[in-house]
């Protein structure tokens, strides 16, 4: 396994999941929960997100070819455009995730439910991460993809367990800077997918 390829895939998936950017939202959703309940919610969010992304990553290509009759090169071009547009939007316009958050009373009554929605889907796993997973599988193969998925969600799990502490240490400016840098990196990955798809499609 080429370590450079693995690191590139890890950074791409980590950037699109953007746990740094959603830590403030996670902190707000769980601030009224006790420590045990908060950890349970984070565990649910990471496990649900991991299973969801693995399923869509490894079945997405089959669905494309059998259901939608889409070639992987066409998907690579479309996915590259999507990742580039998402990155530019987050870099230029806003760093916030758009989500309808339940009020504090709802969060207390339905702690485990918010671990699934909205914390796992769509905050952690959305269209961008699914596209990235499928493209990484096509480019780097199943061994790299599954190990990267495990590693990224393990890092996310550790970060979410430390959410209150990380949120205080980083501050608003720190979170903004790190999030912007990750989105710039992801923009470059999107352009790479787009150009590679165009080159292979037209035999350039």
Image: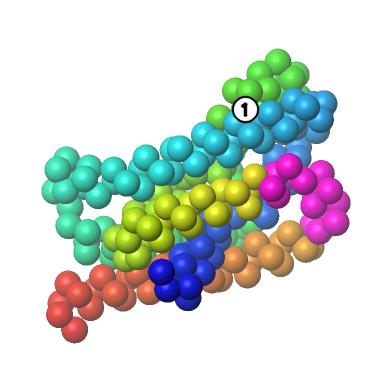
Quadrant of the drawing holding the C terminus: bottom left
**Figure disc tally:** 1
Query: Is 96 placed left or right of 5 in the picture?
Result: right
Residue at 41%, 44% in the rendered image: 54
**From this viewpoint, is residue 67 visible?**
yes
Residue at 69%, 28% in the rendered image: 40
Residue designated by label 1: 114
Q: What element carries label 1?
A: helix
Residue 165 percent coordinates (x, y): 84, 48
Query: Is 47 placed left or right of 33 in the picture?
Result: left
The secondary structure that dominates the magenta segment is helix
The magenta-colored residue range is 158-172
**From this viewpoint, is residue 96 visible?**
no
Quadrant of the drawing holding the N terminus: bottom left
Q: Judge by depth and name the residue closer to the eye, 90 or 21.
A: 21
Does the segment drawn in magenta span residue 72?
A: no
Which image quadrant for residue 39?
top right
Residue at 35%, 69% in the rendered image: 193
The residue carrying pointer 1 sits among few (fewer than 14), some (14 to 19) or many (20 or more) residues within 10 Å by Cα, namely many
Residue at 52%, 34% in the rendered image: 48
Which image quadrant for residue 100?
top right
Residue 44 percent coordinates (x, y): 60, 31
Residue 33 percent coordinates (x, y): 79, 26
Q: Judge by depth and name the residue closer to the eye, 168 or 93.
A: 168
Residue 79 percent coordinates (x, y): 34, 59
């Amino acid at each position: 396994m080429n370590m450079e390829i693995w690191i590139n895939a890890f950074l791409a998936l980590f950037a699109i999941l953007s746990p740094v950017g959603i830590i403030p939202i996670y902190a707000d959703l769980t601030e009224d929960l006790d420590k045990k309940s908060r950890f349970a919610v984070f565990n649910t969010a990471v496990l649900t997100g991991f299973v969801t992304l693995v399923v869509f990553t490894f079945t997405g290509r089959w669905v494309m070819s059998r259901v939608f009759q889409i070639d992987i090169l066409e998907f690579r071009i479309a996915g590259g455009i999507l990742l580039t547009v998402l990155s530019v939007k987050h870099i230029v316009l806003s760093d916030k995730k758009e989500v309808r958050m339940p009020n504090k009373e709802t969060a207390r009554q339905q702690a485990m439910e918010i671990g699934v929605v909205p914390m796992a889907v769509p905050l952690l796993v959305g269209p961008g991460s699914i596209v990235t997973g499928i493209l990484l599988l096509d480019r780097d193969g199943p061994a790299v993809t599954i190990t990267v998925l495990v590693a990224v969600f393990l890092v996310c799990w550790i970060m979410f367990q430390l959410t209150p502490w990380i949120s205080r240490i980083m501050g608003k400016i720190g979170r903004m800077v790190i999030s912007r840098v990750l989105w710039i990196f992801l923009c470059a990955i999107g352009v790479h997918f787009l150009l590679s798809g165009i080159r292979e499609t037209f035999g350039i």
